[in-house]
Image: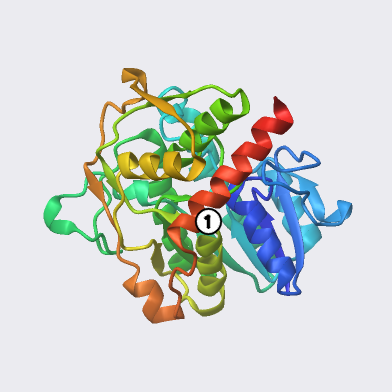
Amino acid sequence: MRFLVTGVAGFAGWHLAERLLAAGHEVFGCDRNLPATTPVAGTLNLPPDHLLVCDICDRGQVEAVVRAVRPDGLFHLAAFTNPAASFDDPDGAYRANLFGSLNVFAAVHAAATPCRVVWVGSSDAYGQVNEGELPVTERNPFRPLSPYAVSKAAADLAAYQWSRAYGLDVVRVRPFNHTGPGQASHFVCANFAFQLAAGKYHRRPARVEVGNLDVVRDFSDVRDVVRAYVAVFERGKTGEAYNVCSGSGRAPRDILERLIQLSGAHADVVVEPARRRSIDVPVLIGSAAKLRDATGWAPMIDWDQTLRDLLKDWVSRVSRDG
């Protein structure tokens, strides 16, 4: 099959493209910025003419790419991905996440050829979750707490509307927290690994600046997550939404302690008030029962293996970049 992955140079986009290629599919990728290499140790293994520059906020560019590729399936991962930064740039979050998604839906609809769209949302759309609502299912209401979360919630609803009003073959996934090699350093697990790797490279005790270590989140390995995206493409029902999560809660405090153990580093942990969110949900754990029932998906990668691979990647990146 022929696939188009938007945001292919990003964290999950790279992993997804590699998985599709390994399965023997023809893969095209587009991104606003296309460096020769990604943060993951390696190069995007796509032919140069399969890598396309495209700003999803530009409807004309999106329509041109979809017309040129004519994909059988489109995975829409391109997005504004930093919840904290969205408070400073809410317009940017809305443009990329809501209007960028609308551009993709319109482009696929205008192409008038069969194409299934897997739209990638976020568990942040659920926002304020009450204790009695855990674990979170797809029936939980949206109560978003950041501009990023609002933009994802709005696009999620738009994806449903396009499936019903215009007959677009779109399925929605709502990934909870995920990590692994290649993740940017503004995400919590990657940030811990980056700070520990920097201390190890400079042969000094790592100073690890942290925010709130006592919230509880549902973490998965990115490689399990993109495997879920493919499973939803293959077996998900048009118009439906599927949580992608482990079903287990982990506190950043425990993750940091395990990373320190795995790294063998000495670390001074310092609470930095600026890293704490002004609004934070104490516990956010999801249920993947609907995904499991529809596709048979379940996490496969051991959590310690995820953390080892994350550390290895950051040691490589720090040593390369100095």
| Between 97 and 269, the one nearer to me in the picture | 269
Q: Position of residue 266 (x, y in %)?
A: 45, 29
| Between 195 and 125, the one nearer to me in the picture | 195
Q: At 40% from the left edge and 45% from the top edge, which residue is drawn?
A: 258
Q: Dot 1 corresponds to which residue?
A: 222
Q: In the displayed structure, would residue 186 be above or below residue 8?
A: above
Image quarter where the N terminus lies is bottom right
Within-10-Å neighbours for mark 1: few <14, some 14–19, many 20+: many
Examine the rendering and report whether any part of residue 8 can be seen.
Answer: yes
Q: In the displayed structure, would residue 26 be above or below residue 134?
A: below
Quarter-of-image position of residue 214: top left
Q: At 46% from the left edge and 58% from the top edge, which residue is drawn?
A: 159
Image quarter where the C terminus lies is top right
Looking at the image, the residue that sits furthest to the left is: 132
Q: At 41% from the left edge and 37% from the top edge, which residue is drawn?
A: 148
Q: Is residue 46 left or right of residue 228?
A: right
Q: At 24% from the left edge and 59% from the top edge, which residue is drawn?
A: 140
Q: Position of residue 47 (x, y in %)?
A: 86, 56
| Between 82 and 94, the one nearer to me in the picture | 82
Q: In the displayed structure, would residue 125 be above or below residue 112?
A: above
Q: Is residue 315 left or right of residue 187?
A: right
Q: Position of residue 9 (x, y in %)?
A: 69, 46
Query: The residue under label 1 is which amino acid type?
Result: Val
Examine the rendering and report whether any part of residue 102 can be seen.
Answer: no
Helix, strand or loop at disc 1? helix
| Between 202 and 140, the one nearer to me in the picture | 202
Q: Position of residue 100 (x, y in %)?
A: 57, 44
